[in-house]
Amino acid sequence: MELLNLADAAARMRLVLRASVLLWLGTLMTVLMRADAALLQHLAGSRVFGSLRPALEWYADQGLFIFYAACIALFVYGMRIKRRLFVRVGLAYVFAQVFGTLLLVRLIKIGCGRPRPFVDAEAWFCEAPSLLRAFHSFPSSHVVNAAVCAMFVMLLLRSRAAALLAIAATLCMAMARIASGAHHLSDVLAGMALGVAITGVVMRLHLFPRWRATETSAAAR
């Protein structure tokens, strides 16, 4: 399993941050064009989607454990090959989860107060702040979690297959959350964009400077 160096990781980061801009634009266009309700109506009448719904609902509930297991396996691998960098990566992942997906996303959910599709499939974007989980549709915290973990996989492993698998798993989580009736399309698009943004901030401010110091120290030996 070959690892990226800092320069390659930074290059990938710039690429995915550009992609996150497109995701934010997609979120805005979805809301303005009222595409959320149209997609839910289309999926409700799809036989193919209906046959896949049980599997998607299972993945919506249990899929995050797969992401957590993948990230833990990655960190354990780094510890076994005695890479100090992976200790810093582990801390960066904790920071992203605690301050990003747990704190920031929760505050956005409360402040937005968007009804989930099973409450009102045609509700407008943010109606009023709410502490009720039924009104915490925007953004999807499951998708944010998945995107954060996928980003760490993409920015550590050189394997393109691993990066594509991480992206595919995140897209499946997005579709699964829509299938379960927990989120709108714009919720999951924003979740992916926010997951990328959270990881980008943590990488830039915390991990990359320490990664650079580690590589410089290793080169000086």
Image: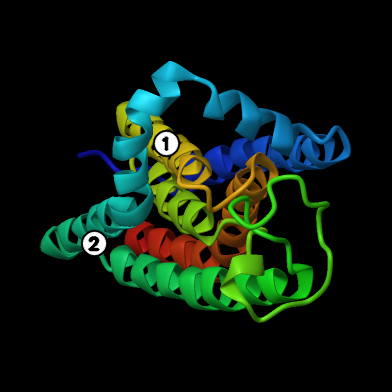
Residue 205 shows in this picture:
no
Q: Amino acid at mark 1?
A: Cys
Residues packed near mark 1 inside 10 Å, few (<14), some (14 to 19) or many (20 plus): some
Where's residue 98, x and y in %?
Answer: 49, 77
Quadrant showing the N terminus:
top left
Quadrant hosting residue 165: top left
Where's residue 21, x and y in %?
Answer: 75, 40
Q: Which mark is residue 111?
A: none
* Residue depth check, mark 2 versus mark 1: number of the one nearer the observer: 1
Q: Image height check: is 136 above or below 183?
A: below
Residue at x-position 81% and y-position 42%:
31
Q: Disc 2 versus disc 1: distance between alpha carbons?
A: 20 Å
Where's residue 110, x and y in %?
Answer: 70, 76
Q: Which mark is residue 172?
A: 1
Q: Amino acid at mark 2?
A: Ile
Decide which of 219, 199 is in the foreground and name it: 199
Residues packed near mark 2 inside 10 Å, few (<14), some (14 to 19) or many (20 plus): some
Residue tagged 2: 72
Decide which of 105, 210 is in the foreground and name it: 105
